[in-house]
Image (tube, helix red, strand yellow):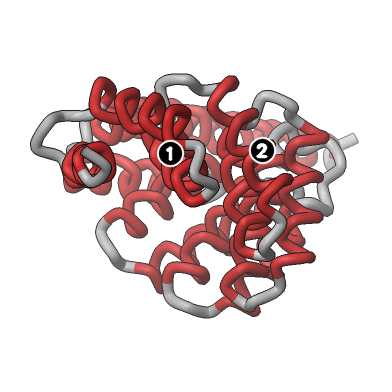
Amino acid sequence: MTSIKPMIVLIAAFFLGACATSAETMKAEKESNAHFKMGVSYLNDNSLQPAFLEFQKAVELNPKDKQAHYYLGHVYFLQKKDPEAILEFERVVKLDPDYSDAYNHAGVVYETDGNLDSALKSYQKALNNKAYEKPHFVHYNIAGIYLKQNKPKEAIAEYHEAINIDPGYFLAYRALGETYLRTNDRKQGVYFLEEASKLSPEDPVTHFRLGEVYQTEKMYQKADVEFKKVIALVPPESDLAKEAKKHLEGRR
C-alpha cells in the first residue's frame, strides 16, 4: 500500500506537466495565427517587409504551420530570394505531401530561374493530389514549359486539358489560339482566340492578336474593329494602344 502514493504523485505530475505543455502550445499557436493574419493583411497591401516579419514570427512560434511557410515562400519569391522560397515550399510539402499549391508555386520559382526540368517535375507533383481544386492552373503552367522546350503538340494537349477542367479559363483559350498559330494552324488559332475574346471581352491582348491575324488574312474590316477595341480598353499612352493605332493608320 505504501508504494501507491508515490505512483499517484508521479501520475499527477505527468498530467500537470502535459497540461502545462498543452497550454503553452495552444498559446503559441494562437499567437502564431495572429501574426499569420497580420502577414496576410500586409501582403494584400503589397507591404512585403512587414509581411515577411509577421510570417517569420508565425513559423517561429509554430513551425508546423504549413500556411505560414507557404506564404513566407511567396514573400521570398516576391523579394527575388528564390532559394529561400524553394526551401519554404519544401517545408510545406514535408508537413503536407498533398499541398499542391506549394508544388505549383515551387514550379513557378524553378521556371523563373530557367530550371525547366525541375519546374516540370514540381508541376507534375502538384497533380498527384486528385482532390486538388485548381489543376487547370497546373496544366496551363505545364503547357508553358513545353512551349519553352519547343514541344507545341504537348503544350496544346495540356491547354486542352486545362479547358476541359475549366471551360471558362480564357487564358488557356488565348494561349491555345497562339500555339495553334505557332504551328501554322490558322483556322484553329483564330477559333480559340475568338473564344477567348467571348469569355473575356475586356482583354485587350486578345483583341490585338485577333486584329493582327485578321489583318494578315486581309479581313481588314474585322481587324479594324479589334484594334479599335484595344484603343478603347487601354491607356492612350500605352505601347499596345500605340501599336493598334499604327495598324489602323497604316491603311489610311
Q: CA distance from mark 2 to mark 1?
A: 14 Å
Q: Secondary structure at mark 2?
A: helix
Q: Residues within 10 Å of mark 2 (few under 14, many from 20)?
A: many
Q: Amino acid at mark 1?
A: Gly
Residue 234 in the figure: left or right of residue 137: left
Q: Residue at x 42, y 48 (%)?
A: 59
Q: Amino acid at mark 2?
A: Phe
Q: Is residue 103 visible?
A: no
Q: Which residue is mark 1?
A: 211
Instruction: State the image coordinates of residue 85 (x, y, percent, origin top left).
Output: 42, 62
Residue 206 in the figure: left or right of residue 193: left
Q: Tell which residue pokes out farthest to the right in this image.
A: 1
Q: Tell which residue pokes out farthest to the left in this image.
A: 237
Q: Is residue 241 visible?
A: yes
Query: Which residue occupies the foreground of this view, 176 or 124?
Result: 176
Is residue 64 shown above or below 204?
Answer: below
Instruction: State the image coordinates of residue 33 (x, y, percent, origin top left).
Output: 42, 29
Q: Which residue is mark 2?
A: 192
Q: Which one is in front in this view, the residue at disc 2 or the one at disc 1?
A: 1
In primary-sequence order, the first of circles 2 and 1 is: 2
Q: Residue at x 57, y 73 (%)?
A: 148
* Label drawn at residue 243: none
Quarter of the rendering occupied by the C terminus: top left
Instruction: State the image coordinates of residue 35 (x, y, percent, origin top left).
Output: 32, 32
Q: Secondary structure at mark 1?
A: helix
Is residue 213 shown above or below 13?
Answer: below
